[in-house]
Image: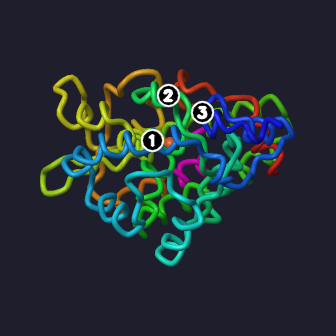
Amino acid sequence: MAQTCVECGLTTGNAPFVAEARDRGTLYITQEYDLYSKANHEAWAALYQRIRPRWERFANDHFLHGIEVLELPKDRIPRLDEINRRLAPLTGFRTRPVSGYVPSFLFFDCLRRREFPTTITIRPKEKMDYLPEPDTFHDVAGHVPMHTEKAFADVLVRFGDCAHTAVEMTGMISDRPERIRRLKSIIQAMSRFFWFTVEFGLMKVNGELRAYGSGILSSFGELQHSIESPEVQRYPAQLEWLINQVAEIDHYQPLLFWVESFEHLFEMVDRLEKWMREGKLNNVAPGLPEVAEKDVQSFMEAA
Ligand SMILES: [Fe+2]
């Protein structure tokens, strides 16, 4: 049976256990820890050991503290139930294994319940540097340590509130094409905001820039590049930029935004919701990221 494919393990692009769940339409799964292969654990260990010194230099203190309190293992893929036992008492957050892409309303709604949809597969060892889709190193080493920080966790929950507001604001529009058009614009605004903060955000602490975005924190190359490269434009975060700036995913980010604190970030998400209510997100600048049909659908179904 495919599920017992020992060679495959739980490797990105080659994990029968996960593919079968996806084919059945099952989104929430379990972390079948025994399915990880030796090569899977070696990939984690190699990624962890390579990036650790760069975390010390370029990551913000909240992240470094998170690594310690979660006791993230160096030499094997973490067990998510162990992570949850340490994480939940701190902020109420938990990881929740998923089989693949989570349509955006469901994703934000999970955050509102303090659940983080978590990929359990890991990239193959020969693709250490770039993977277009998230893997468990990105999700567990890049995102989850930040969830130990209360102010940051509250920001994620507030994103979930925004998704509910989007449903409320568009649910009463009877003209279907107009409803879809507005939803697409609002989803695009939320995705860009999330991209430039939770995924690729920087923080300025005592005049020094440090990364808190998970896309940066899980990338050995981009972590140093984001802080030190003279080619990167780095600006103080402003809501009007965060929602209108085109976000491309297939190369190092040439434009990054920094916040002063997570209270500052929380205040911006608050304002995002206010702008949504005022209609300011109904016509954001066109361009990437494209909004997928199933993302729009997820908001329509929630109404
Ligand atoms: Fe991510």
Label 1 packing within 10 angstroms: few (<14), some (14-19), many (20+):
some
What is the residue that sits farthest to the left in this orientation?
Answer: 207
- In the rendered structure, are the residues bearing label 2 and label 3 in contact, judged by CB atoms less than 8 Å apart? yes
Amino acid type at circle 2 is Leu
Magenta extent: 272-282
| Residue at image mark 3 | 12
Distance from label 2 to label 1 (Cα)? 17 Å
Label 2 packing within 10 angstroms: few (<14), some (14-19), many (20+):
some
Distance from label 1 to label 3 (Cα)? 14 Å
Secondary structure under tag 2 reads loop
266, above or below 142, in the image = below
Q: Residue at x 62, y 61 (%)?
A: 115
Q: Residue at x 53, y 21 (%)?
A: 287
Disc number at residue 42? Answer: 1
| Residue at image mark 2 | 131
Disc nearest the viewer among 2 and 1: 1
- Residue 152 in percent (x, y) is at 42, 62
Amino acid type at circle 3 is Thr
Q: Of callouts 2 and 1, which one flags the residue occurring earlier in the amino acid sequence? A: 1
Q: Of callouts 2 and 3, which one flags the residue occurring earlier in the amino acid sequence? A: 3
Secondary structure under tag 1 reads helix
Ligand 1 within 8 A of label 3's CB?
Answer: no
Q: Residue at x 52, y 27 (%)?
A: 132
Disc nearest the viewer among 2 and 3: 3
- The answer to if 146 sits in the magenta stretch is no
Relative to the observer, which residue lies in front, 9 or 220? 9
- The answer to if 279 sits in the magenta stretch is yes
What is the residue that sits farthest to the bottom in this orientation?
Answer: 89
- Residue 298 in percent (x, y) is at 77, 43
